Each structure stands twice: as structure tokens, then as C-alpha cells.
Amino acid sequence: MIPDAFRLDGKVALVTGASAGIGAAIALALAQAGADVACHGNTRSPQQACEGVETQGRAALGLTGDLADRATPLRLVEQTLARFGQIDILVNNAGTIRRTPAADYSDDDWDAVLEVNLGSVFRLSRAVGQHLMGRESGGKILNIASLLSFQGGITVPAYAASKGGVAQLTKALANEWAAKNINENAIAPGYIKTDNTLALQQNETRNRQILERIPAARWGEAHDLAGAAVGLCSPASDDVHGHVLLVDGGWLGR
Ligand code: NAP
């Protein structure tokens, strides 16, 4: 039955950047669908996300670590495996944005954004991919891309480069791993009300311009991503590989 194809009972998910915003909403949605969830945060505790998972009757594990540090991805995977013994779903959601005109963009900002948004996505996917390849049932890897996987943006060159890279990495890994029952896909959110977009929400002119251009005429909410995320992490999407799904209120079609 089709509702069963969206169930995640008995699955274990690792969600990065679950201390807030989109990651917290996805962690909760995966738990509602039946998964146990390891919730990661960096400067903020993932405690609230863990409590949300537990209110669904699922087991939670709180993890912390800076994904600008190359050692963090493997540690997160090892800690999740030590607690649950398996990982079936990886959601690469953690991401950062630093705004400066390109001519003044510092090497430090470039390196940090590329490592958090792209390098760590590769390192986490590689570690979980190795785990998933060792078994027949495979698994799901979901990356959080962006409208700037397709568009260049302004004063966010590292973010645009990293998110363009996320879309390409999604396809590259899907090509290698689809035959091993590993689905690698991405969601490209539009303008979502989170801390990440606070500066835009609070800028009266930019806020108006953004709303005028979105066909749905509203900002997205973090929970707007939940249905697409559960679908792409569940058996319902077993033949979907290398896809970047827009959840953007219609922005890119305009
Ligand atoms: P958010 O509320 O600011 O959450 C970002 C998450 O990423 C937080 O959990 C944060 O952890 C984590 N993070 C940031 N830097 C990190 C680092 N160095 N190491 C480890 N974790 C780090 O923003 P959000 O909007 O939910 O963003 C989630 C994802 O969606 C990001 O990949 C973002 O690029 C993408 N996205 C967002 C929008 C939007 O409109 N909001 C649009 C397109 C794409 P701490 O807070 O604990 O430090």
C-alpha cells in the first residue's frame, strides 16, 4: 500500500544541522515516519530536535561538531554506528553562508563555506556510502542544495559555488551507487524562514522583492520541506537517483 512505502520503521537516520531550521524539521519528520534519528548541531545543542524525535516514540542521539573540521564527518558516522549499529539514511543539511562582495571575499571565508557546505557533504557521503555498500538493502542519502545550485546570487560566491557543487556531487555519487541500492538525491529549497535568511527577512526592500517574485507569494517554512524529505528517504523513491527537487514556491520556474 502506498502509505506504507513512505514508512521508515526500523530505519536509522543521521541528520546534520538539526539544531535549528530545516534540519530540525526534517529530523522530526523522519521520526514521525518511524525512524530513529541522530541529530547533529554545532554551536547550538541538538537537544530540542532530540526531544522532538523522542516525543514520536523514536530513539534519538545528540551529536555535536564543526563540519569545517575535516575530522568531524567520520566521527559523526562512527558515533551513530556505535549507538545504533546501522545508518540507513544520511541527510546532509548543515550549511553556512557568508556575505561579502567577491572582490573582498577572504580566503578564510571561502575555505570555511566550501568545507562545511561541500567538503563535509562528500566526506559524510563517502563514510556512509562505504557502510551502505556493505549490505544488500542499500540506503538513502539526501543533500540539501539551494536555488543557488542553479543561480549565482550576489555577494555569496562561496555559497553559490558550494551549492552548485552539491547538485553535481549528488549526480556523481548517484551514478556510482544507484546499482548498489543507494539513492543519492537532493532538495533545493527556495526562500525558507530560518536563521539563515534572517538578514533578508528583516530587510524591507529585499523582503518585498523576494515576495513579489515567488509565485506562491509567501516565504516557505521549514516544515514545507518535510514531505519531500520523507519521500526521498523512503522506499517510495527507490527508483529516483541523482535528482535535485525544487521546493521553492515556484521561484525557479518564473
Ligand atoms: P539554519 O537555521 O541557520 O541552520 C543551519 C544548520 O547548519 C544549523 O544546525 C547549524 O548548526 C549548522 N551549521 C552551520 N555551520 C556549521 C558548521 N560549521 N559545522 C556544523 N554545522 C554547521 O539554516 P537553514 O536555513 O535551516 O539551513 C539548512 C540548510 O538549508 C543549509 O544547507 C542551507 O544552505 C540550506 N538552504 C536554506 C535556505 C533557506 O532559505 N533557509 C534556502 C536554500 C538552502 P548550529 O546552529 O548548531 O551552529
Image (tube, rainbow, N blue to C red):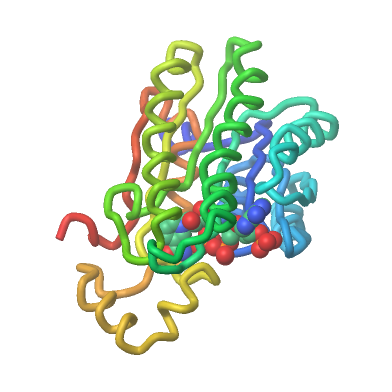
In the depicted structure, whether residue 163 falls above or below residue 86: below
Q: Nearer the viewer, residue 243 or 227?
A: 243
Q: Quadrant of residue 155?
A: bottom left
In the image: residue 114, left or right of residue 186 = right
Query: Of all residues shown, which one is farthest toward the left?
Result: 254
Q: Quadrant of residue 165?
A: top left
In the depicted structure, whether residue 244 falls above or below residue 44: above
Query: Of all residues shown, which one is farthest toward the bottom?
Result: 204
Residue 183's x, y, as percent? 46, 26
Residue at image x 60%, y 33%? 89
Residue at image x 59%, y 22%? 129
Residue 236 appears in view: yes
* Quadrant (top left, top right, bottom left, bottom right) of the N terminus: top left
Residue 22 appears in view: no
Residue 198's x, y, as percent? 49, 77
In the depicted structure, whether residue 3 falls above or below residue 160: above
Residue 141's x, y, as percent? 53, 32
In the image: residue 144, left or right of residue 209 = right
Residue 138's x, y, as percent? 56, 18
**Quadrant where ligand 1 appears:** bottom right
Residue at image x 44%, y 68%? 100
Query: Of all residues shown, which one is farthest toward the right?
Result: 82
Q: Quadrant of residue 11?
A: top right
Residue at image x 40%, y 24%? 172
* Quadrant (top left, top right, bottom left, bottom right) of the C terminus: bottom left
Number of callouts: 0
